[in-house]
Image: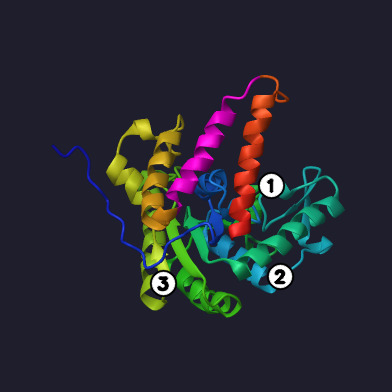
């Protein structure tokens, strides 16, 4: 008896292992996947500009990282007692302008280095809807609670996203010729405009990715959106807001991703890391106890071994 519809994932022509360097950009779902890689001690960096949702904000970030562009004082906006960047998530904001710039630029340096060395860039697009700041004439990453009348909100078209990335992908390949690019569409539903508009938005993203795959080599797609909607297809796989995937759903999608893209030869090492992590999660109240410190030392040694082997 078959109780679910398997989406199926294409077998890739590459595999991720403990030697791979990864850069993940995108929505909350990208952050969830990055946490999995971090848990298993892979070499991963995620969202040097903070959480991103739309393709144009992600393109802005990639262009800045290619240029290694440092933010200047005039790039910031003062809003509600804090200095913010319209290209960054709110986590970079600060009451002190100098501190805000320091936080931003230190991440630019690290992110630019990772982009040049990454074996795989994973981009998770969440929505085709964007906010354009009317005065600065830029698509923003975050509105930072600036009044709505300072923005124009509209849905991107397939053609304009393809045009933007068709110009940028060659620039990425110039600084990192061997890097592969894996796209995925976030299974998180954007419900502001209702069910139909959410589907139209996701359709724009899916059609864009298909066109980029047809135009460029080493462009891949992982169907996280389809797995949640078509394979799991049940509200028990959603969080309480009924829009975000539950922890169970994230774990399920991760297992499919792992079995598809991670080299099986690294599974035993991943199991060792997981075993130590689980034992440490059952830590005593006193973190100075010998048993806890012994587990921590074992994990530190294992992580150091992994890093040296890279």
Residue at x 80%, y 56% (from the top left corner) = 101
Residue furthest to the left in view is: 1
Between 30 and 235, the one nearer to me in the picture: 30
Q: Which element is circle 3 on? A: helix
Q: Is residue 102 visible?
A: yes
Please rate how many residues cluster around mark 2, counting C-alpha atoms within 10 Å: few if below 14, some from 14 to 19, many from 20.
some
- Percent across and percent down for residue 85 are 72, 55
Q: Is residue 137 visible?
A: no
- Percent across and percent down for residue 33 are 50, 48
In the displayed structure, 282 sits above or below 140; it is: above
Disc 1/disc 2 C-alpha distance (Å): 21 Å
Q: Which element is circle 2 on? A: loop
Residue at x 57%, y 47% (from the top left corner) = 38
- Residue on which the image places disc 3: 212
In the displayed structure, 100 sits above or below 115; it is: above
Between 120 and 234, the one nearer to me in the picture: 120
- Percent across and percent down for residue 171 are 57, 78
Residue at x 50%, y 60% (from the top left corner) = 122
Please tell me whether mark 1 or mark 2 is closer to you in this view: 2
Please rate how many residues cluster around mark 1, counting C-alpha atoms within 10 Å: few if below 14, some from 14 to 19, many from 20.
many
- Percent across and percent down for residue 167 are 53, 78
Label placed on residue 68:
2
Contact check, label 3 and label 1, Cβ < 8 Å: no
Contact check, label 1 and label 2, Cβ < 8 Å: no
Between 96 and 262, the one nearer to me in the picture: 262
Quadrant of the snapshot with the N terminus: top left
> Hey, which quadrant is residue 289 in on the image?
top right
- Residue on which the image places disc 1: 90
Please tell me whether mark 2 or mark 3 is closer to you in this view: 2
Which tag, 3 or 1, sits closer to the chain's start?
1
Q: Which residues are magenta?
A: 266-284
Residue at x 73%, y 63% (from the top left corner) = 109
């Amino acid at each position: 008896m078959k109780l679910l519809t398997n989406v199926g994932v294409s077998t890739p022509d590459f595999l991720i292992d403990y030697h791979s360097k990864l850069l993940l950009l995108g929505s909350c779902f990208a952050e969830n996947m990055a946490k999995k890689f971090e848990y298993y001690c892979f070499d991963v960096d995620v969202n040097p500009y903070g959480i991103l949702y739309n393709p144009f904000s992600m393109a802005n970030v990639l262009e800045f990282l290619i240029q290694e562009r440092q933010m200047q004082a005039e790039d910031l906006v003062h809003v509600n007692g804090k200095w913010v960047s319209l290209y960054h998530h709110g986590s970079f904001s600060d009451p002190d302008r100098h501190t805000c710039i320091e936080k931003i630029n230190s991440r630019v340096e690290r992110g630019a280095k990772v982009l040049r060395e990454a074996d795989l860039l994973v981009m998770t697009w969440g929505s085709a809807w964007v906010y354009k700041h009317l005065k600065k004439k830029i698509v923003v990453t975050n509105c930072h609670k600036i009044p709505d009348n300072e923005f124009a909100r509209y849905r991107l078209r397939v053609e304009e996203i393809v045009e933007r990335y068709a110009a940028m992908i060659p620039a990425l390949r110039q600084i990192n010729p061997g890097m592969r690019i894996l796209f995925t569409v976030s299974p998180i539903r954007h419900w502001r405009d209702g069910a139909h508009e959410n589907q139209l938005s996701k359709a724009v993203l899916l059609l864009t990715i298909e066109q980029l795959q047809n135009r460029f080599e080493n462009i891949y797609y992982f169907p996280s959106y389809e797995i949640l909607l078509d394979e799991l297809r049940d509200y028990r796989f959603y969080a309480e807001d009924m829009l975000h995937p539950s922890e169970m759903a994230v774990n399920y999608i991760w297992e499919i991703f792992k079995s598809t893209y991670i080299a099986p030869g690294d599974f035993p090492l991943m199991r060792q890391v997981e075993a130590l992590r689980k034992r440490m999660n059952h830590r005593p109240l006193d973190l100075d106890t010998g048993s806890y410190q012994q587990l921590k030392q074992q994990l530190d040694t294992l992580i150091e071994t992994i890093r040296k082997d890279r």
